[in-house]
Amino acid sequence: MTAGEVQGGTERQEQDFLHFGDFGRNGRPADFYRGVLEVDPNICQPILSALNVGSKRRSPAEEDLAADLLLASELSASWRALGYWASSYLPFSRVDLDMNGDGIEEVIYRRGEIWGPYMPHRLFWHRSAPTDESQITFEREKEVLGGIISTGEWESTLRNQVSVLAGFVGLDGVWRRQTIHPPLPEGLELPGGPGGRVSEGGSLYDIAILNGRAFVLKTSARYYGQPRKPEVFVFSSLGPRRHKFECLFRGKFEIRSQRRVLQLRQ
């Protein structure tokens, strides 16, 4: 039985949703996404094709389950799990690669978060790391985070955090937290709430490698309790807070966290 089909009675009826439990057991079905917007088809089509091969769970870490199922493909970077953050019981992994094409290898950390039923990510962009790193000490954690930036434009954010935000206009009329240049096409809204903020459960991230170039994939972590068709935004990145929109893909099925009875015509 393929995704979106259910049998019963004397008829087969199409459905436009998948239950997350089945999604987790069976993996992402083939041909799950469709292209919505493409800036450069030479980037978007290969990434979409890789996503549409389907995916099964890659990491044994529960915190990475949703990212594996929604974003992982044969183009995914090889994340290396490193245990837990020093100051909190939060899992993290890392990958070493040239993120912005400047010929210098960066170290990208992906830290899991736990917000109620959601398990979003934060990415951190660092210039160097011990090659044999197997755990994060308190001192190393401070280096990775980079300290807090408090300026008029950024208000308060961690220096090395990868922030992919569409921005919003404050009460003073100033456009704040805009990290996508040029801005997103009109009418698009990032996962994670207005402007890409974390008010709706945060985001999941993966990195795809295509012809030696790295691309950030971002989708919502809020699959629990609110049925939705997943949207995957693809960006190229010049730095932690400077990104260029490349593609938007949308799932063909809603992901539902609770089973709903599908009435079949007799």
Image: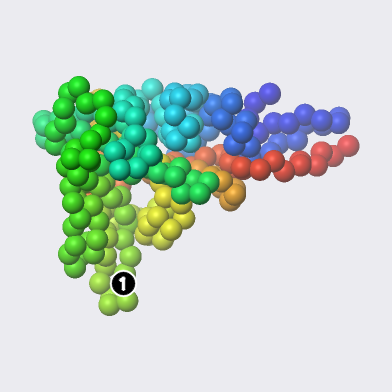
16 or 129, which is in the foreground? 129
Residue 104 in sight here:
yes
Q: Residue 260 vs residue 43: left or right? A: right
| Horizontal and vertical percent position of residue 55 | 48, 25
**Quadrant of the rendered structure where residue 215 is?**
top left
**Quadrant of the rendered structure where residue 216 is?**
top left
Is residue 158 depicted above or below 167 in this figure? above
**Quadrant of the rendered structure where residue 101 is?**
top left
Q: Residue 51 vs residue 6: left or right? A: left
Picture residue at 18% right of the left edge, 57% below the top: 149
| Horizontal and vertical percent position of residue 212 | 22, 26
Picture residue at 31% right of the left edge, 38% below the top: 85
Picture residue at 19% right of the left edge, 68% below the top: 152
Label 1 neighbour load within 10 Å: few <14, some 14-19, many 20+: few
Q: Secondary structure at mark 1?
A: loop
Q: Where is mark 1, residue-wise?
A: 170
Picture residue at 84% right of the left edge, 39% below the top: 265
Where the C terminus falls, by quadrant?
A: top right
Amino acid carrying mark 1 in the image: Gly
| Horizontal and vertical percent position of residue 158 | 23, 52
182 or 228, which is in the foreground? 228
